[in-house]
Image (tube, rainbow, N blue to C red):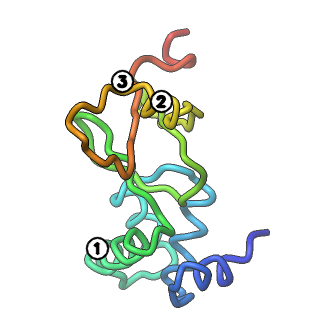
Amino acid sequence: MNNYTELLRQHNLKATPQRLAITDILNMHGHVSIEFLYEQMLNKFNSISLATIYKNINIMLENAFVQEVKIPHSKSVYELTKEVHSHLVCDNCGAVQDITVPIHTILEQTDNTQEFEIKSASVVFTGICKECKN
């Protein structure tokens, strides 16, 4: 079992009961929407507000503990921060999967005539997953 308290502290975050629960849900489900997170949190904290969820997610984002996955034509989902990776998103069922794509290689091959310093990159591939194809 992961030591969520220590993980949060490594990111300069207090290990509050709400943050521990959010971490547990993200670890268990991978990529989750705010709405799904809120529904799950209501099972543990029956008086928690949506504002509290947003507040905690934003603090976790600022401290690089959680990252936002922006999905085209859909709401963002959130996941625990891990090594650099991209995502596959099914247009039919909405499933989100991690995929390793050598982004640094893509950036090296990019024509940077604008002398723009790229600090981060996000790649989301959309299509139809194996389950929906069958």
State the CA–CA distance, disc 2 to disc 1: 28 Å
The kind of residue on which mark 3 rests is: Asp
- Pinpoint residue 104: horizontal percent, then vertical percent: 51, 37
Q: Earlier in the sequence, mark 2 or mark 1?
A: 1
The kind of residue on which mark 1 rests is: Leu
The kind of residue on which mark 2 rests is: Leu
Quarter placement of the N terminus: bottom right
- Pinpoint residue 22: horizontal percent, then vertical percent: 51, 71
Residue bearing the label numbered 3:
91
In this picture, residue 94 sits left or right of residue 22: left
Under circle 3, the secondary element is loop
Residue bearing the label numbered 1:
50
Closer to the eye: label 2 or 1: 2
Which residue is depicted at the point 46% across and 68% down?
64
Under circle 1, the secondary element is helix
Closer to the eye: label 3 or 2: 2
Quarter placement of the C terminus: top right
Q: Earlier in the sequence, mark 3 or mark 1?
A: 1
Residue bearing the label numbered 2:
88
Which residue is depicted at the point 25% across and 41% down?
115
Depicted 67 relative to depicted 110: above or below: below
